[in-house]
Image (cartoon, rainbow, N blue to C red):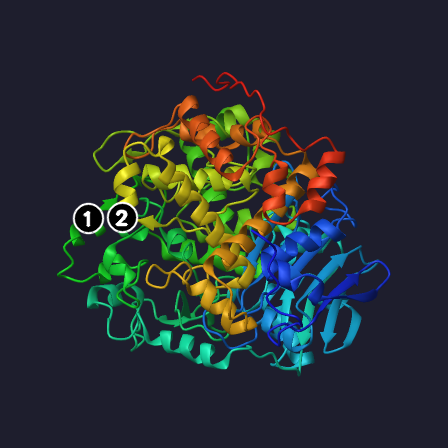
Amino acid sequence: MAKKVFFDQLPSCYAGKILKIDLTSKTTSIIPTEKYANDYVGGRAMANRVYWDEAKGGVPALSAENTLIYMTGPLAGTGLPYAGRSIMTGISPKTIPEQYAHTCCGGYFGAVLKWAGYDGFILTGKADSFTYVVIDDDKISFEDASELKGMFVTDTQEKLFGIYGRKSSSLVIGPAGENQCRHASIVTHADSAFAMPGFGAVWGYKNLKAIVARGTGTIAPMDIEKTLEIHAWRDTPEKGKPYPPEYMEKFGSDEFPIYANGFYQTFNSCNPGCNHICMCTRNNLPNPLNPAGEAVSMVGKCMDGCAYSMRRDNPYPLGSYIDFPRQSEPGKYLWQVPILCDEDDPLKDEYLRCYPGNLLHLWGPDFEFGKMMMWCCNQYGLDKWDINFWLFTWLFQCQKEGLFDEAGIDFGRKIDFSDPQFAKYILDCMTYRQGPIGELLAEGMGRMIRALGKEKFGDTICHGIYNRDGEERFVPVSWETSWGGCSHWQGRGWQGCEKNVWVSMNILHMIGSRDEANGAHSHDHYENYLQYKDDPCHHPLMVDATVYNIRRNEMKDSLLLCEFKDPDPGRPNMELDMYKAATGAKHATMEDIDHLADRGKIIERAIFMRDHGRTRDMEIVQVYPWMTFPDPWGDTVTWDEWNDFVDMFYTDRKWDLETGWPTREAWEEVELNDIAEFFEKEGKLPAENSNYVRKPNPFDR
């Protein structure tokens, strides 16, 4: 495809500047957004290209040289619905090995930054003292943060509101980031956070407590008529399809009923313009860290309910993954809430057929224990996912298998999953590096387990987990899968799923560096599913579905759409319509959108190759071992089956089968000839006809 130029001058949906912040010299400079906007949209694709151009690769995560890229997309600040998220990339201190990673965040900061005149910022260097940065329109200042040192997340945010007003917005770290805990997050309002790669630890190393933005400018979409048309979508599917009473009783209602323990529940969206109420707020809660103090409100997301009880895996209806014919009608019903399907849908039973997951028999139900765990994560600035689904499951399973007693490991307190103070104690140890166990915890789960001995504390099989038919299912005590991350939609551990889903998702995890499932919700059409469901590793339609999900994930992270609203089975051109409305690119097509997504994704591949020496041999061993454990239905893949699927995927992407490196044709298809030339000089431009010979299985059990 020939390179297409969508606009001659920068559209009004962009602020026009990317701010480069050097913490060492306390200076700033400007890069024009127009240098990148035509070719890289915004968000993830633009961040990837800026990182390729600006960053020094192969540096330690906790170093002054680690360059972090923050980027908004063309939709932020425009008032378009389901938009306003932002992204950050850089070298992650959590991944194993340390490598380039990304993380997305909701909240208002991206919109406010654009109103201040900036589409993103590049963060380099290290401040000589504890600092926060203020971006106040075109005035940039570096402020003394000594009074903020040690403050909890919400206290820091409130302090900054008091100084800069309620129209400001901030990104802050808590004590976990200050102490360079590798699970530390960077948080904005309503618990929206850059969490998974541990970038809070990087800010802590750089002596950066916060960045505050305040702006008086405006950002406008180019196509107002298209924007109004998109706003009309907001009445569906919520309007005219009320939630059934049993659903509302479970999750709250418009009347905000008072629960038995005194709190009531409301819903909120995470960024401007969105009406997709995917987060709930539990109001009037006693403060877990100070029960005698004022009542607090706790924002809850999908993992919060699991903190209260981890007795069973969530059962997932097929309709959460596969798009059925009725869903192709805009606003018909929510794919995420399959119980809302029509009673007369002839495929209703198939749509609602559940993949049951396992009976885990871990902790709970215990609201107070879970509340303490989640509140500490909120206030200390810790990644909730890894704390809930990795740290605490690991503690429970190792204790059950007697591993701590056998090794003589003393946590300094009884491991008790009915005691909220135990949850606080463990997270205090991690956050403040208290004692030898605290130092280990702060280095992140993967590194701690290796320090203790991975064979025992990672790979020991946990007993007592059963599928719904009563058959025991064996998984390791540690749910680590790829690149130092925790299992998610990978068939076992937490959120099991049908084989076709975990085959596809494991490709995304394999070629990435973090949990891709948070944004890349697996989708395909029912008619395709029927063809590959019995043998997903050998069907080309499974490759097509995987490529589709990669493209949707890349584009939603570049436009920066809501990860729950996109992709929408009833609106397959949603990304195109949003792009047209924001930029005025009237002649853009879905083929163009996919082309831009391919370009953004392959630059990430380039960074992995240049900075981390990424190859097929490195990748394939990351995800394959996890798939050798039976999922709840007893499904696994063999070494040859998995390699067959990787071969098909690499071939589709025009990547070399032996090395996993893109061929010249792959680079030139997306007009990245300069990167092709770079890799030719590096000796990493493979011949188009390599003589690849498959290696034997190194993981025979």
Is 28 displayed left or right of 659 in the figure? Answer: right
Contact? badges 2 and 1 (CB < 8 Å): yes
Q: How many marks?
A: 2
Specify the quadrant of the image occupied by residue 617. Answer: top right
- Please name the amino acid that badge 1 sits on: Glu
Where does the image place residue 626, in percent across and percent down from the top left?
A: 44, 31
The secondary element bearing badge 1 is classed as: helix
Q: Is residue 332 above or below residue 624?
A: below
Q: Is residue 465 above or below residue 695?
A: below
Q: CA distance from mark 2 to mark 1?
A: 10 Å
The crowding category of the residue bearing disc 2, from other C-alpha atoms within 10 Å (few below 14, some 14 to 19, many at least 20), is some
The secondary element bearing badge 2 is classed as: helix
Nearest to N terminus: mark 2 or mark 1? 1
- Please name the amino acid that badge 2 sits on: Tyr
Where does the image place residue 322, in percent across and percent down from the top left?
A: 30, 50
Q: Residue at x 64, y 30 (%)?
A: 686
Q: Is residue 422 visible?
A: no
Depth check, front residue: 646 or 185: 646
Is 272 displayed left or right of 370 in the figure? Answer: right
Depth check, front residue: 126 or 546: 546
**Disc sitting over residue 526 in the figure:** 2
Question: Looking at this rendering, what residue extends furthest in the right direction?
Answer: 25
The residue carrying mark 1 is: 350
Q: Is residue 166 above or below residue 504?
A: below
Where does the image place residue 34, in percent across and percent down from the top left?
A: 69, 66
Q: Is residue 99 above or below residue 368?
A: above
**Disc sitting over residue 650 in the figure:** none
> Closer to us: mark 2 or mark 1?
2
Q: Residue at x 49, y 24 (%)?
A: 406
